[in-house]
Image (tube, coloured by chain):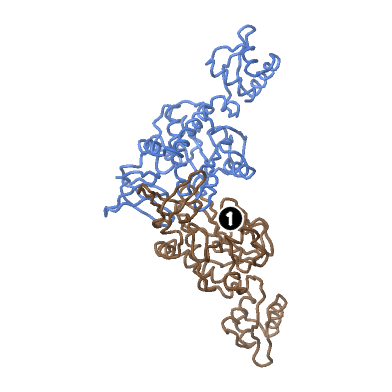
Chain colours: A brown, B blue
Amino acid sequence: MKAGTAILEAFYQAAGQFVRVDDLGRRLKLPATAVNAEIAELEKIGYTIESHPHFGYRLLGTPDRLTADDVKAQLKSPLIGSEILVFEETASTNEVIEHLAKSGAREGLVVFAESQTRGRGRRGRAWASPRGKGLWFSVLLRPTLPTSAASRITVAASVAVARAIRQNCGVDARIKWPNDVMVNGKKLAGILTELRAEADEILLAILGIGIDVNCSREDFPGELGDIATSLELETGNAQDRVALAAQVLTTFDECYQAALTNFETVVDEWAKLCTTLGRQIVVTMGQNRIEGYAQALDSDGALLLRRDSGQIERILGGDVVVERT
Amino acid sequence: MKAGTAILEAFYQAAGQFVRVDDLGRRLKLPATAVNAEIAELEKIGYTIESHPHFGYRLLGTPDRLTADDVKAQLKSPLIGSEILVFEETASTNEVIEHLAKSGAREGLVVFAESQTRGRGRRGRAWASPRGKGLWFSVLLRPTLPTSAASRITVAASVAVARAIRQNCGVDARIKWPNDVMVNGKKLAGILTELRAEADEILLAILGIGIDVNCSREDFPGELGDIATSLELETGNAQDRVALAAQVLTTFDECYQAALTNFETVVDEWAKLCTTLGRQIVVTMGQNRIEGYAQALDSDGALLLRRDSGQIERILGGDVVVERT
């Protein structure tokens, strides 16, 4: 563990209390002078740290800035986030992961960017990623899953994002099938799973997640304000992005493991959070358009749609519009 | 259509008879002098063409060499092979297609190589591609299919390769589930489908096919001779690679269209050709190992395996070993 991560972890465990310099030294296996130098580094990048000649140091404030050290210090997941990189700006975090995966990067690698110049959503749609306002990140996965079970990853991610937001920010986050996280009918987060696969087996999956954390009204110009929102707009308070990032990764680690071995539990939670069920909807995929009643999710995460004729269609993906009735 | 393709098409239609120079000129919309120059080009790359002052030209012999013109001249498919590239040597034709796909290459593009230095089979296994001895090629597909239906592509390709080989070379080609084409219990051809996809929708598929056409015993050293074979070894005659290539592409065009719209017909033909059904088998996928009786194929191309307990398992991929009973 890096020194910065270890110091921040000690501060978070102390929950606002002082931590003695010799305690920090033991954790870091470093002499007091080196501890003081590491503290100075943290202050330089924006952490507010009080020093006391006898009691040591305590953390008073964190910068609104993602750092790998800080996310790691709050992480409770064995796999997801085992390596974390943070870029000030990149074209797209999915693209960064794709490059790193080719050189053999390991499962669990997470790449954040403070801003993306070519952030993208499903089907190549643009995804706005204003600097420092959200969590824009990607996770490298190498699941042992048949290609046909790829939607499990999206399901696990939607559940993890919704659950982490509910727990951390106290808002009623819900899932719109298949992969949007909504609050009060507006989109708060999007999930994009990209695969490289053989016909029967997934080689690697890149999970891209975008969460509008502290976006302001100006970040959603025009009609976007009617369909998109942020956690700051919904709660009235700026949210701690680092804490939320750590919570989402920790929760996703749990949901991902469950998706691989015990997917029914994930589907159950998803169904409870899903706003699409029990409604008349229209699904479009390419030039196909299917209307019906969203009846249930099956064990693969497919949507079971009951048409007027009574016939059940198994819907694997597409764009959903809930009918206004 | 290129001049070379048009001339070869005229020769194949004439089936060994002479074609008049002014007929060729009309087809090519070129004067006689230009026709003569094109004929000289074909002779230069190895075609044996007889010339007669009155009757014109006739084709006596073709070189054992793949050319895009020649494959195209024998092709009867609207989509597959709409563009054809032939490389003398490349790392892997799948990699060439991947690069071209990024720059927007269109569905149906086919890339052949006379030899590959890094030809690969499923799960990164090496695939030997000795120069001029086989058909080593890849096809770019952009199917409108859910990701979970990716195995349809492999199924369509196995059926196409087996059917084309049966028709063209008169050998009893069979399919070993999921993707090997066999003759007399030995492997003759392999199929690798690689995907780029979102969780629910295929973005593009690269179909790689390797067929051991004129490989000699020396091309299968050691124990390989017990498990692999070629069309020349099975029939006792060198086979016309260009004619077979055109037949495989034409047949695949048909099977691919059927796989998109009317997959049951493809599954029916597959089941008839499949040697795996009706046997005790062992399937391994990663660390999983399942034994049972290969009972049937379902409408997605999955193998339905009946375990001793009577339970039916739906197998989506993996390596199959037929038990010696």
Specify the amino acid type for callout 1.
Gly
Would residue A291 appear left or right of A33 to someone viewing this image?
left
Toward the viewer: B190 or A9? A9
Say whether residue A132 is left or right of residue A255: right
Which chain is indicated by disc 1? Answer: A
Binning the other alpha carbons within 10 Å of mark 1 as few (below 14), some (14 to 19) or many (20 upward) gives some
Q: In the orientation shown, which residue stands out farthest toward the bottom?
A: A54
Quadrant assignment, res A273: bottom left
Locate the C terminus of chain B and report the quarter of the image it occupies. top left
- The image shows residue A124, relative to residue A10, as above or below, that is above
Q: Quadrant of the N terminus of chain B?
A: top right
In terms of secondary structure, where does tag 1 sit? loop
Outermost residue to the left: B309
Reading the image, the residue beneath label 1 is A121
- Whether B298 is drawn above or below A1: the answer is above
For residue B41, say whether it is visible: yes
Counting from the top left corner in percent of width and height, residue A303 is at 42, 54
Which residue is pictured at 65% across the width and 15% down the height?
Answer: B25
Residue B64 coordinates in the image, percent (x, y): 57, 26
Who's the residue at 56% across and 53% down the image? A122
Asked whether, in this view, residue B233 is left or right of residue B54, the answer is left
Task: Give the percent coordinates (x, y) of residue B258.
Answer: 44, 36
- Percent across and percent down for residue A20 are 63, 88
Find the residue positioned furthest to the front: A325
Can residue A252 be seen here? The reply is: no
Q: Is residue A275 above or below residue A55?
A: above
